[in-house]
Amino acid sequence: MADQVFWDDVEEGTKLPEVVKNPTTQQLVKYAGASGDYYQIHYDQGFAKNNDLEDVILHGALKNAFLGHLVTKWMGPDGYLKRLACQYRGMDIPGTPVTAKGLVTKKYQDQGANLVDCEIWLENENGERTTPGSATVALPSR
Amino acid sequence: MTTPASFLTEEMIQKAIGQKSAPRSIDIEKGAIIKFAQAIEDDNPVYNDEQAARDSRYGGLIAPPTFLRSVGVDRPEYPFDMPFTRLLDGGSDWEYFHPIRAGDRITAVAEIADINERTGRMGLMIITSIVVTYRNQFDQVAATQTSTSIRY
């Protein structure tokens, strides 16, 4: 069973354990099928190049899902995700790993809920944040 | 390729804001949830394992946070001819109010919240902010998604 993180034990600056992903063209096809997003820039290299892209690129929404994985894994079975946001600033291509990272930026209470805001992002091999975002989760207290 | 320096007029913007898509309803199937979790490679048992999900506080399988993307909501129609065919996804901002469970029936409606234009590396771009509201069979808003789409 996954460990549970408690609001009491979290501080501003607490890091979320990283989640490393190694997306492949096969994963993009699986994601296209599972999500219903069949835009060809995600699996047809000729089509992608015709659209001024260097290669097929990861679905933005797949990167969003990777960040969701980061946050929901960290918050544990009794955490509750309230908000998940990200911006697709840079493109990521299959065959190169991306790492989901995050840290707590604010710890507070609102209407009886124990909340934390996190800064989250996906980083490519060069350390560039291609997909910055933020999340808010409610955590249990001890 | 040449693109115009400007395309949107104030009148077009005012007409576009508030345009809604037709509602789209889908039944949330257990198999679709599991397939989605496998595609994003998230092994959390509440998405993948019926028995473990029953023992969780949810009492059954729930969908991963971005699963609702697969509802495939229609885009609101623009009240003008869009001069660009290329499309990029700029980002998403989700808010969650109720878990999405296997067996739910979700109805989604998309609405244009804002539209503007900008000149970037690839020339003129039209940037639309679209809010999708996802309601469950109890007419509860389960989630909202504000997404940014870029046409160029």
Image: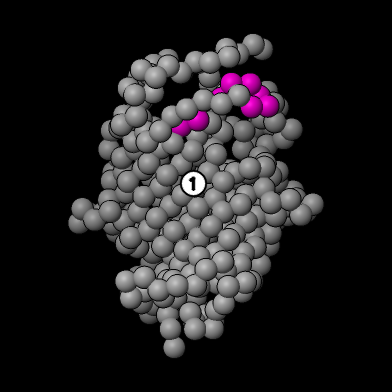
- Residue B122 among magenta residues: yes
Q: Which residue is mark 1?
A: B92
- What quarter of the picture does the C terminus of chain B occupy? top right
Q: Position of residue B24 (x, y in %)?
A: 30, 39
Residue B146, picture quadrant? top left
Which residue is nearer to you in this view: A26 or A1?
A1
Q: Is residue A100 left or right of residue B151?
A: right
Q: Is residue B54 among the parts visible in the rendering?
A: no
Can you name the residue that lies furthest to the left here?
Answer: B138
User: Which residue appears at 68% of the width and 27% of the height?
Assistant: B121
Judge whether B38 appears above or below A43 on screen: below
Q: Amino acid at mark 1?
A: Ser
Q: Position of residue A65 (x, y in %)?
A: 54, 55
- Residue A20 among magenta residues: no
Q: Position of residue A75 (x, y in %)?
A: 50, 73
Magenta segment range?
B120-128
- What quarter of the picture does the N terminus of chain B occupy? top right
Q: Is residue A6 left or right of residue A48?
A: left
Counting other residues with Cα less than 10 Å from the Cα at mark 1, is it few (<14), some (14-19), or many (20 or more)?
many
Q: Position of residue A134 (x, y in %)?
A: 53, 57
Q: Is residue B44 left or right of residue B131?
A: right
User: Which residue appears at 50% of the width and 65% of the height?
Assistant: A117
